[in-house]
Image: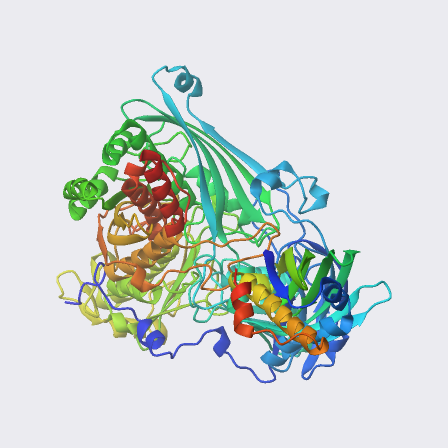
């Protein structure tokens, strides 16, 4: 028997080459006569460009050309925004600033030189004379209207979107209903992929072809956009995403530097390379989050929440990147979490400020929603002196039933009670509460925090996605019997070379090692959308599954023709294609031979064995889970130490538990990082103060405990594999669990809420203030 | 970013004020000063070579003395820019006579931008204080050398007094 593959802990095919440093990233691409770019960036958050003097830079060794915004005008298209919201204001977003800069780090000019260091040295010699203008970085001030980021709009409001549902009159008429008002701040974060961005663009004048290597999550979408921006016929543009060292949404974009690299290569007829420095990465790669949520929580004395109102202010930054305005709309959509709250009112205001654009960062709008609703549950519990577990149970919809919430969202199959029960058992919740009470008497502060999240992923039905939400998969059985798989997804750490090989090997009954998965090359993979929104396995994996089924159908037809059996009775097992009882049998490779040598094909059957399938998902999927964080807060220093973390996640059917664990672990690190340490800070003049890894406080391994993970498996009916998606779950679930834990520890100090990150200084102030007030 | 401090100088107030208005004395004392030229409008054009942590570079700047009230006080406007970013500041310097000596106090507000801000914010205040300290150290030495009746100040002693 061939070993069972799906559901097994199978080691990643990707790891040997990654661990040994034998893989190829964009910066490993070396082409003959390659030249290098270095960008001159604005040191001002808002200024007029009076003049640009490049004479001194031009005389520097190795310098070939220098371009500024005017030199590109009309010759290179604008940076695209795909989000189509009603009434959305979309400012022109040129690849190099034209006349005015609107955030620190905005590219103003580019230097092309023979060497990377020559380009950087010369860029430092480009003199830009600015006339500084007042900048706006605070969202409340930006909404109030001055100063203006884009004068032509007359205000700083990019869009206002409303979402309302339920019977508010009934909620407000009920005399027993209490109301809490609270402002929550979800701070700006840097996505911080290990590999920074980078692009190599190579235009061949003879062939009139443009080949682009980019560290991207969306090679196919990038290909289309670069063709539009550069004017090169799309059939002559090829985009390759080689090994991509992490992205977390930050490479789900079309960036200025990609456009400029293509433009310069076309101008000079030479291959061009640009590799982002870490400083540039922190300044000019999209940021995540940055939301203010003003809440009104309506609840009854028994803990039942009957209504939620939320004003969302979303800091979009100065310009729209690919999906910038769409991200906060996901917060509104998911704001009720997994709770049956009968009335909802959300108004989302997208705000322009003099900062780098925000866009998708792991979770993309859903961590903000989960943070809101999970803090709501804890605030209600605190107000009523109830256990947060009981408040959650009070508000869950009944298990196993599809519910349509007041937001209009219809979640697929779920059992929130089951994951909660499992995490309470796993963590020994009751015991922990006992320990907490004992320690408090000794002046030690243990905190236990819960989060029972639901998220929306497997993005998504094309009707809801700006550029389509389908995914393509191709399976080709080669003449030797080895199997090639092509996916339109573009993984960058997810491990799909492993999981997709598992799917195909299991379906075809061939050895796992015989299956090779390719992705990321638009000349190899016929069409694709990419990897984001926890969609790769649920949408891309399903396409692969269907393509493999089509291969089987054809092979069954070939085998039955040869064996004189019915196609319906053919099975694939142990490298054989045979009748159910095994009496009529052919080797897998012999059936492949039939297809390629094409001597006795059944009538109407084409030679060869290649099948493509494009999967259009009928709906999103809604993974859910329950997390418990246990922290100790040092009342003398304010320091939080994470003692235990328990995560029970339901991402539907699990194809490879090791990959699921890996996603959860990484997600937890980022979510916990936001709760305790990370923030990307601008000062009031729009200067980024956290421009190094030391300042923006990315967490390190030693700051975490061992994560105890477990799963429940509730299969989704949305795709035949039953998989939901897990890429963002850890991040979404963990931030509120951590904050709830710290505030639980601080309960004796009478603090209802504190904004993230919960750094020792903030806690110390609360603890010392609280202590002096009670003394 | 706020910068402030004070320094005792072993010279009469009038002399200190006059030397602070003298481009050559300033240029001699200003750390990393490669050029300090008086412009027709009364401001100075300066070239400074400054290194703060990893941000080393040459900065072009303009220094303007405003509202001088000899020998009591003046205000100072500073603007500079270079590959590491830009600096803009305004401050007030006042001189108080203490017998034959002078207590000089300075306070100001500086705005920095670009790489200096994103990379150097944490150390910028300390670095600015250090530059001010170095300046007055050198300025005191300059006074001592050019005023024969006074002696060289003790560096350690002065650091202690300046460390508040």
Pick the residue in front: A770 or A250.
A770
Residue in view at x 20 percent, y 45 percent: A423
Q: Residue A391 placed where, x, y %?
A: 27, 31
Q: Residue A446 placed where, x, y %?
A: 24, 46
Asked if one can make out residue A549 in the rendered structure from this viewpoint, the answer is no
Locate the C terminus of chain A by quadrant.
top left
Asked if one can make out residue A246 in the rendered structure from this viewpoint, the answer is yes
B55 vs A312: above or below: below
A550 vs A296: above or below: below
Locate the N terminus of chain A by quadrant.
bottom left
A644 vs A768: above or below: below
Residue in view at x 71 percent, y 61 percent: B78
Q: Residue A96 placed where, x, y %?
A: 67, 62
In the drawing, does residue A693 fall left or right of residue A57? Answer: left
In the drawing, does residue A697 fall left or right of residue A354? Answer: left
Pick the residue in front: A406 or B125.
B125
Pick the residue in front: A363 or A489.
A363
Number of numbered discs overlaid on the protein picture: 0
Residue in view at x 16 percent, y 42 percent: A438
**The quarter of the displayed image where residue A145 is located:** top right
**The quarter of the displayed image where residue A352 is located:** top right
């Amino acid at each position: 028997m061939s070993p069972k593959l799906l559901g097994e802990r199978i080691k990643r095919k990707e790891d040997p080459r990654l661990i040994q440093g034998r893989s190829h990233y964009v910066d490993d691409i070396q082409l003959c006569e390659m030249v290098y770019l270095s960008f001159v960036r604005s040191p001002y958050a808002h200024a007029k460009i009076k003049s640009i003097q490049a004479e001194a830079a031009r005389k520097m060794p190795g310098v070939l050309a220098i371009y500024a915004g005017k030199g590109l005008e009309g010759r290179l298209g604008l940076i695209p925004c795909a989000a189509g919201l009603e009434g959305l204001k979309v400012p022109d977003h040129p690849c190099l600033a034209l006349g005015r800069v609107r955030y620190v780090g905005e590219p103003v000019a580019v230097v092309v030189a023979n060497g990377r260091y020559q380009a950087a040295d010369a860029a430092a010699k480009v003199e830009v004379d600015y006339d500084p203008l007042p900048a706006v970085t605070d969202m409340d001030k930006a909404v109030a209207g001055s100063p203006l980021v884009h004068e032509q709009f007359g205000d700083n409001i990019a869009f206002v979107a409303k979402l309302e549902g339920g019977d508010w009159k009934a909620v407000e008429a009920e005399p027993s209903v209490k109301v809490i008002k609270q402002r929550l701040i979800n701070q700006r974060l840097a996505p911080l992929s290990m590999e920074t961005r980078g692009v190599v663009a190579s235009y061949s004048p003879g062939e009139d072809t443009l080949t682009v290597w980019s560290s991207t999550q969306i090679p196919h979408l990038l290909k289309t956009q670069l063709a539009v921006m550069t004017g090169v016929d799309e059939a002559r543009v090829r985009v390759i995403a080689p090994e991509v060292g992490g992205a977390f949404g930050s490479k789900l974009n079309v960036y200025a530097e990609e456009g400029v690299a293509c433009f310069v290569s076309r101008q000079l007829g030479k291959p061009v390379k640009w590799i982002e420095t870490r400083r540039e990465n922190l300044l000019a790669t999209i940021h995540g989050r940055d939301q203010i949520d003003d809440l009104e929580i309506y609840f009854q004395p028994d803990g039942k929440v009957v209504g939620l109102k939320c004003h969302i202010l979303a800091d979009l930054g100065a310009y729209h990147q690919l999906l910038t305005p769409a991200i906060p709309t996901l917060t509104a959509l998911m704001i009720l979490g997994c709770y049956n709250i009968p009335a909802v009112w959300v108004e989302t205001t997208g705000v322009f400020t003099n900062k780098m654009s925000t866009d998708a960062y792991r979770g993309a709008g859903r961590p903000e929603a989960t943070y809101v609703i999970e803090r709501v549950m804890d605030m209600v519990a605190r107000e009523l002196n109830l256990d947060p577990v009981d408040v959650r149970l009070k508000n869950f919809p009944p298990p196993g039933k599809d519910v349509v919430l007041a937001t209009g969202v219809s979640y697929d199959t779920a059992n929130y009670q089951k994951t909660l029960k499992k995490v309470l058992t796993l963590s020994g919740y009751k015991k922990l509460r006992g320990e907490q009470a004992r320690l408090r008497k000794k002046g030690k502060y243990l905190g236990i925090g819960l989060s029972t999240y639901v998220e929306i992923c497997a993005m998504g039905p094309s009707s809801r996605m700006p550029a389509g939400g389908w995914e393509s998969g191709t399976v080709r059985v080669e003449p030797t019997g080895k199997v090639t798989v092509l996916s339109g997804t573009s993984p960058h750490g997810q491990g799909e070379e492993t999981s997709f090989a598992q799917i195909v090997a299991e379906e075809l009954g061939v050895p796992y090692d015989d299956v090779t998965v390719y992705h990321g090359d638009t000349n190899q993979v016929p069409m694709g959308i990419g990897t984001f929104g926890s969609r790769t396995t649920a949408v891309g994996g399903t396409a692969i599954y269907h393509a493999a089924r089509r291969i089987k159908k054809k092979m069954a037809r070939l085998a039955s023709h040869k064996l004189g059996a019915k196609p319906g009775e053919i099975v694939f097992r142990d490298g054989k294609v045979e009748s159910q009882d095994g009496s009529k049998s052919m080797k897998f490779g012999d059936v492949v031979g039939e297809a390629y040598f094409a001597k006795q094909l059944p009538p109407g059957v084409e030679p060869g064995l290649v099948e493509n399938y494009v999967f259009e998902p009928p709906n999103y999927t809604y993974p859910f889970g329950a997390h418990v964080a246990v922290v100790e807060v040092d009342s003398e220093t304010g320091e939080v130490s994470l003692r235990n973390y328990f995560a029970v996640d339901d991402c539907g059917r699990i194809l490879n538990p090791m990959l699921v664990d890996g996603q959860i672990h990484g997600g937890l690190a980022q979510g916990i990082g936001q709760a305790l340490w990370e923030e990307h800070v601008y000062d009031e003049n729009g200067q980024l103060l956290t421009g190094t890894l030391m300042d923006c406080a990315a967490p390190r391994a030693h700051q975490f405990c061992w994560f105890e993970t477990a799963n429940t498996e509730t299969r989704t009916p949305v795709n035949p594999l039953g998989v939901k998606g897990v890429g963002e779950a850890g991040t979404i679930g963990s931030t509120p669990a951590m904050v709830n834990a710290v505030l639980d520890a601080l309960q004796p100090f009478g603090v209802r809420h504190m904004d993230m990150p919960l750094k020792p200084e903030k806690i110390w102030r609360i603890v010392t203030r609280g202590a002096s007030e009670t003394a | 970013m706020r910068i402030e401090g004070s320094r005792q100088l072993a010279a009469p107030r009038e002399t200190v004020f006059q030397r602070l208005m003298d481009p050559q004395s300033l240029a001699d004392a200003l750390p990393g000063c490669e050029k300090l030229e008086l412009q027709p409008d009364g401001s100075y054009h300066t070239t400074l070579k400054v290194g703060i942590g990893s941000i080393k570079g040459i900065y072009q700047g303009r220094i303007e003395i405003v509202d001088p009230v000899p020998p009591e006080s003046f205000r100072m406007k500073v603007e500079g820019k270079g590959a590491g970013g830009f600096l803009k500041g305004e401050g007030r310097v006042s001189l108080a006579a203490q017998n034959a000596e002078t207590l000089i106090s300075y306070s100001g507000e500086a705005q920095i931008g670009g790489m200096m801000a994103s990379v150097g914010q944490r150390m910028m205040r300390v670095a600015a204080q250090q530059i001010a300290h170095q300046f007055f150290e050198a300025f005191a030495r300059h006074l001592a050398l050019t005023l024969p009746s006074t002696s060289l100040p003790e560096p350690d002693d002065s650091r202690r007094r300046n460390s508040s």
